[in-house]
Amino acid sequence: MLFLTKLGDLLSGDNKSAPSIVIRLAIIIILTAVATKVVSSVFKRIEKNRRAAGRTFGYVRIARYALLGLVYAAAVAAVISGNAKQTVSAVIASSGVAAVVLSIACQEPIGNLCSGLIIILTSPFKIGDIIRHIGLNATGTVEEITLRHTVIRTAENKRLFIPNSDMNKAAIENSNYGEARLYMPLEFSITYESNIDVAIQVVTNVILRHPNFDDAQAERDRAVGKDPVGVLVNRFEDSGIVLKVWVWAENLSSSYAMKSDILREVHKHFKYAHIEFAYPHMEIIAKKEDL
């Protein structure tokens, strides 16, 4: 009980001796550190549990930041209260200069803070989503969203730290927003001497036999009288004819493997069907009278 009384006297700031002031500041710093550690630990555990359950946790993060802000504000108030008269005088004297400096220095951080709150509240993307920043042409998985920046892990396992103000105003492509299915384009260029009908049938058969081909989408297409694969003659080029087809993939991750499988199988079956891939080449034709 005596210890608590002494602690209260130190925190009240009644004792103005130099040792008491140092001890008082040390106690405030220790209590602030302990409080922030406890708050961060509790909220991070809540955030981890919600993430494991597949639930959103943006509001939990906002609550953590708000509570930490209150802890720091209480610490500042405790320091100021010990020397209130001198502090108020100093603040009044320097308020004009401080206002100008803060307005310049904090313009970008405040913008990032507001943008971070908007991203967390509106959730155009969340942790775990695969997104593409169109302006930067950067694609990756969202790994972290703080009040200052968004962390994106690229396919090369590198981290991009993008300010929230930039993320908030940029065009973002989210592969996980809504449904995860992906409409994937494929093109095949064949020579003019190749049989187009045979080439179309080969591509169609390869796609239909792939284990990741979306049967549900195929049934819906058949119900409305639409070809579930639909290989089209897209255009004529100098070296050959370009066939194009759009294939439904389950998600972005599986689309890469699916595309590789289809290209490999089409190459193999084109060889058996005597379908040649087009490539730039030149033919020289000599007339008899020139010989």
Image: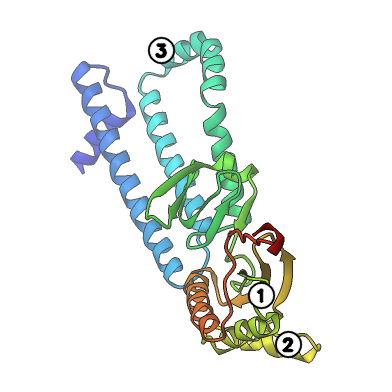
Q: Is residue 284 above or below residue 110?
A: below
Res 123 seen here: no
- Image position, residue 222 (x, y; %): 75, 90
Q: Are marks 3 and 2 in contact (CB under 8 Å)?
A: no
28 or 214, which lies in front? 214
- Image position, residue 263 (x, y; %): 52, 74
Residue placed under numbered mark 2 in the picture: 220
Please tell me which of labels 3 and 2 falls first in the chain.
Answer: 3
- Image position, residue 151 (x, y; %): 45, 49
Q: What's the CA distance linking mark 3 and mark 2?
A: 77 Å
Q: Residue at x 60, y 60 (%)?
A: 174
87 or 103, which lies in front? 103
Q: Secondary structure at mark 2?
A: helix
5 or 52, which lies in front? 52
Residue placed under numbered mark 1 in the picture: 193
Q: Which mark is residue 86?
A: 3
Q: Amino acid at mark 2?
A: Arg
Q: What's the CA distance linking mark 2 and mark 1?
A: 35 Å
Q: Are marks 2 and 1 in contact (CB under 8 Å)?
A: no
Please tell me which of labels 1 and 3 falls first in the chain.
Answer: 3
Q: Residue furthest top?
A: 93
Q: Amino acid at mark 3?
A: Gln
